[in-house]
Each structure stands twice: as structure tokens, then as C-alpha cells.
């Protein structure tokens, strides 16, 4: 289940997704992956710990990286607010920020309608955090 709180913006009320409890760690992910595969938690952990470095190297080669069941990672950059007048003047020195972008994996029907997003549980249930009491904060 996922949790939301009520938030007032511009005189109107909206649900706002929130997280609760401690952040899931690499150990948590490795243990869960090992339960649904033939790989040990230790082997899974080792792969996960090195994943960031591998993704970084692939993206630094100018590639995007698609992980089946997860999505696609790619780099984007921001340049200084001062553009230049000609294409010949464009240089890497204008880049002021680099970010990793992510597009979650999804599938579409023939009519182009999104039918499945792998990172969103199809049975996701939203719960009002304020209605479950303080017992869930542990």
C-alpha cells in the first residue's frame, strides 16, 4: 500500500504521496531479489553495489541504459543562461549541471494507451496516512 496526506494548495485540497518508515536499503533489495531467483543474497548485493558504477560508465560513453523491468537511464545537462551567437562558439564550458534522468518502463496497447508500468504495482492501494494512526510510524 502507498500512503498520502491531504495538502492545501491555492485554497484547494489535494492528496500528496508520502513515504513512511526507514528507507529500503541495498540489503533489503538483495534479500527480496534472492527470494524470487536462484541467486544468493550476497551475490545479488554484490551486483547491486556495482550497478551505479556500471551505469555511470555506460552513460559517460554517451549511451542510455535500459534495464528490462525497470526503465531507461540517461544523462541530461543544463547550460549557463548566456547562450552564444554561433554554433562554433558552443563548448562544454557552458555546461553548468549534469543530471541522470529516468523513464520508468511501460507498455502500450495498439491504440497507444499505456497499459502497464512495471514500477507501479497493479494492485496498489492508496491509504490516508492520517487515518491509520501513529502505530504505522515504526
Image (cartoon, rainbow, N blue to C red):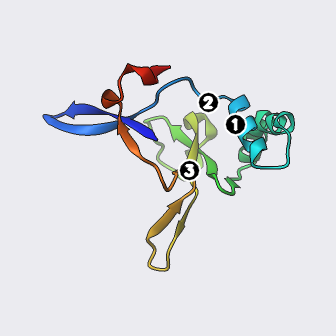
Which residue bears the numbered disc 2?
24
Mark 2 crowdedness (10 Å alpha carbons): few <14, some 14-19, many ≥20: few
Q: Nearer the viewer, residue 2 or 95?
A: 2
Q: Earlier in the sequence, mark 2 or mark 1?
A: 2
- Spatial CA distance of label 1 from label 3 is 14 Å
- Spatial CA distance of label 2 from label 3 is 15 Å
- Is residue 37 shown left or right of residue 129? right
Identity of the residue drawn at 57% across and 38% down:
99
Q: Nearer the viewer, residue 63 or 71?
A: 71
- Residue 59 badge: none
Reply above or below: 49 against 37: above
- Residue 29 badge: 1
Identity of the residue drawn at 20% across and 33% down:
9
- List x then y, in percent, for residue 80: 48, 34
- List x then y, in percent, for residue 120: 51, 51
Q: Nearer the viewer, residue 135 or 86?
A: 135
Mark 2 lies on a secondary structure that is loop
- Residue 119 badge: 3
Amino acid at each position: 500500500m502507498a500512503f498520502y496526506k491531504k495538502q492545501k494548495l491555492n485554497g484547494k485540497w489535494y492528496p500528496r504521496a508520502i513515504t513512511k518508515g526507514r528507507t529500503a536499503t541495498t540489503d533489503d533489495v538483495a534479500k527480496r531479489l534472492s527470494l524470487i531467483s536462484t541467486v544468493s543474497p550476497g551475490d545479488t548485493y554484490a551486483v547491486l553495489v556495482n550497478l551505479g558504477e556500471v551505469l555511470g560508465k555506460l552513460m559517460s560513453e554517451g549511451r542510455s541504459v535500459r534495464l528490462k523491468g525497470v526503465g531507461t537511464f540517461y544523462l541530461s545537462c543544463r547550460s549557463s543562461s548566456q547562450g552564444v551567437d554561433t554554433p562554433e562558439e558552443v563548448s562544454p564550458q557552458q555546461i553548468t549541471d549534469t543530471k541522470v534522468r529516468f523513464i520508468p518502463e511501460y507498455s502500450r496497447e495498439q491504440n497507444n494507451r499505456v497499459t502497464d508500468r512495471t514500477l507501479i504495482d497493479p494492485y496498489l492501494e492508496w491509504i490516508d496516512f492520517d487515518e491509520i494512526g501513529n502505530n504505522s510510524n515504526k
